[in-house]
Image (cartoon, helix red, strand yellow):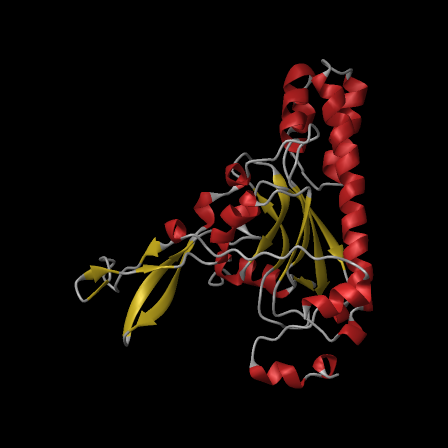
Amino acid sequence: VRPVYEESLGSKFNLGFSEQKPSTDTIAADEHNEPFREDGKLVFRPGGHGALIENLNDLDADIIFIKNIDNIVPDARKNPTVIYKKMLAGLLVSVQEKSFGYLREMDEGLLPDERLWEIAGFCEQELNNIHPGIAEIEGEALQEYLYAKLNRPIRVCGMVPNTGEPGGGPFLTVNADGTISPQILESSQIDLKNPVEKAKMMRSTHFNPVDLVCAVRNYKGEKYDLLRYVDHTTGFISLKSKGGKELKALELPGLWNGSMSDWNTLFVEVPLETFNPVKTVNDLLRQEHQF
């Protein structure tokens, strides 16, 4: 397959594969919350796609595109996807350039209040990083806050209109420090027994197809340590089975959920035609998967 595409596109591809590290596996528990054993041995399970943040951290790249492997279409239908991939990347670079410019300025010394409030406006209006009490911060403390908020990885996430597909979606959430920021949440992270929270989820207009473009270097060209931006409190327990016995599995914070919790995040609507999943064999019968 590779030679065919290299010849038709006049390009060379450097392909590689990586797997979840065994060190990210988590211990399983039984229904009584005791370690699950099989033939007297402890059972460890893969920690979910959140474990891949370590693989992502190992990549030597400036910009990284992330997409679910089951979200594909025949070549004849790829044009919309290609166009919007370029659009997402262009927006990412544009926002990154603004962030880098502000960070360079702040590294040179304390900025005047007017300039700091301009940067604060960028954080709130373009990055949707909201600090309810920011009006009470000034001078050096304000600059330190803004610098910390800008000096982190950036991701632009394509979102499609919600048509009832299973999966997460875009939300604004309150962080541990009291600030508000965009996050991708799964239904398992929402208290569906709370009618208010359930109603918010049911009103969601968009769905996460896992279509991300990520910038993982700072303005000096240094790689961010992506493991520093994980919210470890967002892991969860799922119910599985092994050998006919039920077990509880600890899932690490999802790759595009808690594992990227402290990234700067932008949501962009992309057409539904860029989302063509294959979750079951019946999905292959969809029109968009026909040659």
Q: Taking 214 as reference, is 17 left or right?
A: left
Residue 125 drawn at (x, y percent): 77, 39
Residue with the most extreme left position:
40
Q: Taking 36 as reference, is 259 left or right?
A: right
Q: Give the camera-side residue of 220 and 181.
A: 220
Q: Is residue 80 visible to us here?
A: no
Q: Give the camera-side residue of 272 and 78.
A: 78
Instruction: Look at 54% across and 39% down and name the residue there.
Output: 229
Q: How many numbered callouts? A: 0
Residue 58 drawn at (x, y percent): 54, 44
Q: Give the camera-side residue of 59 and 277.
A: 59
**In this rendering, is residue 170 above or below 277?**
above
**In this rendering, is residue 175 above or below 206?**
above
Instruction: Look at 72% across and 64% down and name the residue there.
Output: 160
Q: Is residue 182 visible to us here?
A: yes
Residue 9 is drawn in which quadrant? bottom right
Instruction: Look at 62% across and 72% down and name the residue there.
Output: 165
Residue with the most extreme top position:
109
Residue 98 is drawn in which quadrant? top right
Residue 171 drawn at (x, y percent): 63, 53
Instruction: Look at 64% across and 82% down and name the residue there.
Output: 284
Q: Quadrant of the N terminus?
A: bottom right
Q: Quadrant of the C terminus?
A: bottom right
**In this rendering, is residue 47 above or below 284?**
above
Q: Give the camera-side residue of 239 and 82.
A: 82
Q: Taking 19 as reference, is 277 left or right?
A: right
